[in-house]
Amino acid sequence: MRRIAVVLGLCTLSLSMAAWADPIFINQFGTVSITDAGIVSRGSELMDFNGIKAPPGHALGSVTFSTGALASGSIWSGGIFSSAGSSFIVTGAGKYGEPKGTIFDAVFVGPIRWTVVSHTGKYDYIFKLSGAVTGMIYTGRVITGTTAQTIAVHQNQWFQDHSGNIRAGEANFRVGTPEPGTWGLFGTGLIILGGAKLRKLLRT
């Protein structure tokens, strides 16, 4: 009986740990406007949500983000954008198993890094935009993670409309506040383990 109680307790704790897992968002395509006033994305498609993949030629929804103004450095050599007034919004279409409506409503926190990844030829640049984001997931929890967006910019095109193209983007989350049900599972596990320990003490 004691062994069963311990096993049940460990299983319950494992469920609790699993409930802490937070989603991964993968986006692709779309454009960004890049100026010293900030970076604003347009039309980036949500391609993967926590393992749900968009069918070929379709999207699960959209990912939009914006930064604050350039705080240091420069657009062409890399620098830091402010998180003041920023946003990071993931919206689901609700067609392929993903939630419909706002999945994640967040802002950047701390410095947003703008890094030169490569500079080929005279005008072609690849940049990486990266930073921490925090906000509310559709389940009602507040979660925190990081995002990295790979952006291609052709300098001649930029001089015309200040635009670049999103090649790939990803947001990963590893820190979250457990849901009330998670705390209940955690508490149940502790009670079972405590009961097993108490019976052992009484028999000695």
Image (cartoon, rainbow, N blue to C red):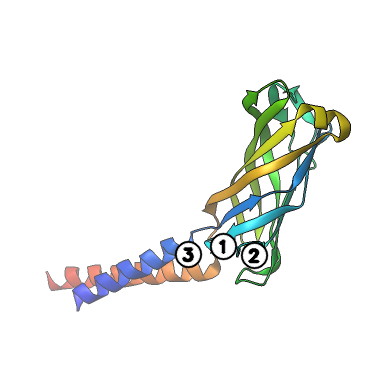
In this view, 136 is above or below 123: below
- The residue identified by callout 1 is 53
Badge 2: few (under 14), some or many (20 or more) residues near its Cα, within 10 Å? few
> Which callout, 2 or 1, points to the residue nearer the camera?
1
Q: Quadrant of residue 82?
A: top right
C-alpha separation, residue under disc 2 versus residue under disc 1: 23 Å
C-alpha separation, residue under disc 2 versus residue under disc 3: 14 Å
Q: Position of residue 191 (x, y in %)?
A: 35, 71
- Tell me, yes or no, if residue 97 can be seen here: yes
- The residue identified by callout 2 is 140
* Residue 50 vs residue 134, the one in the foreground: 50
> Which callout, 3 or 1, points to the residue nearer the camera?
1
Badge 1 amino acid: Lys
Badge 1: few (under 14), some or many (20 or more) residues near its Cα, within 10 Å? some
Quarter of the picture containing the N terminus is bottom left
The mark that comes first in sequence, 2 or 3, is 3
* Residue appearing at x 60%, y 52% in the figure: 26
Q: Quadrant of residue 10?
A: bottom left
SS for callout 2 = loop
Q: Which mark is residue 19?
A: 3
- Tell me, yes or no, if residue 36 can be seen here: no
The mark that comes first in sequence, 3 or 1, is 3
Badge 3: few (under 14), some or many (20 or more) residues near its Cα, within 10 Å? some
Badge 2 amino acid: Gly
Q: Is residue 100 left or right of residue 193?
A: right
Quick one: which residue is furthest to the right in this view? Answer: 160
Q: Position of residue 200 (x, y in %)?
A: 18, 70
Look at the numbered discs 2 and 3 and tell me whether their residues touch, using CB distance below 8 Å.
no
